[in-house]
Image (cartoon, grey):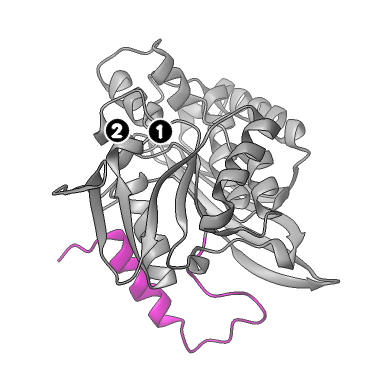
């Protein structure tokens, strides 16, 4: 019988529950955390991109895939509030990608790494039968007191998101229909991690829980709910998007930040965020007691069955 992604992850975590963690935090956040002394920690994450699942060679250049491979991993580091410092890259290449394609991929990966001051410190290369597979391990460094976890949401917190949602998901649909040059399609192929925003929010004590939006708000808010043992109420009239709500709530790969903020401080945080980044930090709901996700529209309860992107 097939299992959902969350069920699979839970079963893997259970298998390792009794194994010593050797100083690492257990599964549950965008990154694991390792104390390295002097009140500093390393945060470490890994993510995989597979051809025809996360990118199409017919619709994305090697350079675009190289850029995206780094960005989606730096996004996990940003979601913890950390400064990215290094990556490890492993890549499986079929014969027809072992020449010009991988050269373009690596040039772009190197350019993006230089722009963020992120070193490449290891990895692996191997042959593949017919599809490209890419795995990146991203490492960040930060003060322990600034770590943002999914488990830190509190009842009464305001749920906020950075930026605009849904453009990447809409872009994927455009690409699937052959519309490769729309702004949404370009945004999908050239993901941007909110690295500076994540570090800045990490230093704000009024920000409690935080993660990146990789599978859609309808899915990702449930991670915060589960880890924090709370419920959430989201107002669809507040969702910042230029597209159909399905793209904004159920589509993946926005790589914006989803966070919960102390209610008494949210207005000041929004103003400070706008002044610092010239961008929007939008309140879209609140954390409530219980374990349910409730949808409302301008405060009125509505029925909405949205689950977000599912890997299985």
Q: Residues within 10 Å of mark 2 (few under 14, many from 20)?
A: many
Q: Is residue 113 placed above or below 81 in the rendered structure?
A: above
* Residue 55 picture quarter: top left
Residue 116: in magenta span: no
Instruction: Kindly identify the residue that appears in the image at 52 percent across and 25 percent down.
Output: 190
Q: Which mark is residue 23?
A: none
Residue 3: in magenta span: yes
Residue 33, image x, y percentages? 64, 68
Q: Is residue 69 placed above or below 293 in the rendered structure?
A: above
**SS assignment at label 2:** helix
Residue occupied by mark 1: 165
Mark 2 or mark 1: which comes first in sequence? 1
Magenta segment = 1-29
Q: Is residue 250 placed above or below 202 in the rendered structure?
A: above
> Which SS does the magenta portion mostly show?
loop
Q: Is residue 194 left or right of residue 169?
A: right
Residue occupied by mark 2: 247
Q: Nearer the viewer, residue 160 or 122?
A: 160
Q: Nearer the viewer, residue 81 or 72?
A: 81
Residue 107, image x, y percentages? 67, 26
Instruction: Kindly identify the residue that appears in the image at 59 percent across and 81 percent down.
Output: 21
Instruction: Kindly identify the residue that appears in the image at 50 percent across and 20 percent down.
Output: 61
Marks 2 and 1, Cα distance to the nearest angstrom? 8 Å
């Amino acid at each position: 019988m097939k299992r959902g992604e969350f069920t699979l992850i839970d079963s893997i975590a259970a298998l390792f529950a009794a194994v010593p963690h050797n100083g690492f935090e257990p599964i549950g956040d965008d990154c694991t955390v390792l104390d390295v002394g002097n009140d500093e920690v390393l945060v470490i994450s890994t993510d995989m991109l597979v051809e025809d699942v996360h990118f199409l060679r017919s619709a994305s250049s090697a350079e675009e895939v190289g850029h995206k491979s780094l960005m989606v991993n730096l996004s996990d580091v940003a979601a913890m509030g950390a400064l990215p410092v290094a990556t490890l890259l492993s890549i499986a290449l079929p014969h027809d990608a072992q020449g010009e394609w991988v050269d373009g991929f690596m040039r772009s990966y190197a350019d993006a790494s230089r722009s963020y001051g992120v070193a490449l410190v290891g990895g692996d290369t191997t042959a593949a039968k017919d599809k490209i597979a890419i795995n990146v391990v991203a490492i960040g460094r930060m003060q322990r007191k600034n770590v943002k976890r999914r488990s830190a949401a509190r009842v009464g917190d305001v749920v906020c998101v950075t930026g605009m949602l849904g453009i990447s998901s809409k872009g994927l649909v455009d690409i699937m229909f052959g519309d490769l040059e729309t702004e949404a399609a370009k945004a999908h192929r050239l993901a941007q991690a909110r690295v500076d925003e994540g570090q800045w929010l990490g230093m704000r004590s009024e920000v409690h829980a935080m993660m990146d939006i990789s599978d859609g708000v309808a899915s990702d808010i449930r991670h915060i709910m589960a880890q924090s043992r709370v419920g959430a109420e989201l107002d669809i009239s507040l969702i910042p998007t230029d597209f159909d709500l399905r793209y904004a709530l159920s589509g993946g790969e926005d790589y914006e930040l989803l966070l919960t903020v102390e209610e008494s401080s949210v207005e000041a945080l929004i103003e400070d965020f706008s002044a610092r980044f010239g961008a929007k930090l939008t309140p879209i709901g609140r954390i409530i007691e219980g374990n349910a996700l409730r949808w409302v529209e301008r405060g009125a309860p509505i029925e909405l069955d949205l689950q977000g992107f599912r890997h299985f």
